[in-house]
Image (tube, grey):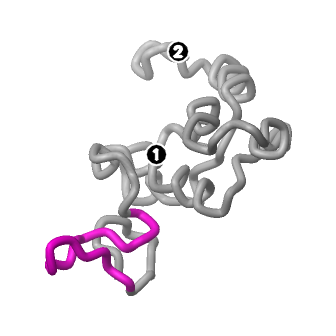
Amino acid sequence: MCQAVNWCDLEDRHYKYGKAKSHCSLHYNCPSNARSRPWLYYKTEHMAKGKLECEHCKVDLVEKHPDIDIWTLSAAMDVDHINSDIKHTLEGEHPNNYQLLCKTCHAIKSHQEGDFVAKYQRK
């Protein structure tokens, strides 16, 4: 089981220098700071499938820009917390609370929900 990602049940652990690492082969390529930012694992899962499709407007950047590598395209996508009130909780940092959005859809959703205002200042 992947020890780094609480929802991953892959058994194949990545080995380096003969030692088993905490990540499975799928999540091994995640950025080094992903443990403190678990939504990056969700983005990596989509990239491994070769699809970067906005879950709101349905644009697929891999289809739209076939000549650009997926790592470059991933910069145009954000992982959004569907319910931002439960961020940083076990329930809030789970794929059920994530959605992959293009930058435009993410900006619009964040503005509509007032995410740019500190939580203690929201009415």
- Could you tell me what secondary structure mostly forms the magenta stretch? strand
Q: Quadrant of residue 51?
A: bottom right
| Mark 2, secondary structure of its residue | loop
Q: Type of residue at label 1?
A: Ile
Q: Residue at x 15, y 73 (%)?
A: 17
What is the C-alpha distance between the residues marked 2 and 1? 16 Å
- Tally the numbered discs: 2
The residue that appears at 34% across and 48% down in the rendered structure is: 34
Q: Among all residues in the image, which is located at the extreme bottom? A: 11
Crowd tier of the residue under label 2, counting other residues whose Cα lies within 10 Å: few below 14, some 14–19, many 20 or above: few
Q: Amino acid at mark 2?
A: Phe
Residue 18 percent coordinates (x, y): 15, 80
Membership of 23 in magenta stretch: yes
Q: Label 1: how many residues lie within 10 Å, few (<14), some (14-19) or many (20+)?
A: few
Q: Is residue 36 left or right of residue 73?
A: left
119 up-or-down from 44: above or below: above
Which-is-in-front pick, marks 2 and 1?
2
- Residue drawn at x 46%, y 48% as measured from the top left: 39
**Residue behind mark 1:** 86
Along the line of sight, the residue nearer the viewer: 83 or 1: 1
Q: Quadrant of the C terminus?
A: top right
x, y (%) of residue 118? 43, 16
Read off the residue under disc 2: 116
Query: What kind of element bears circle 1?
Result: helix
Spot occupied by residue 56 in the image (x, y as percentages of width and height): 80, 41
**What segment is highlighted magenta in the picture?**
12-27
Q: Nearer the viewer, residue 111 or 9?
A: 9
Q: Is residue 108 magenta?
A: no
x 78%, y 42%: residue? 66
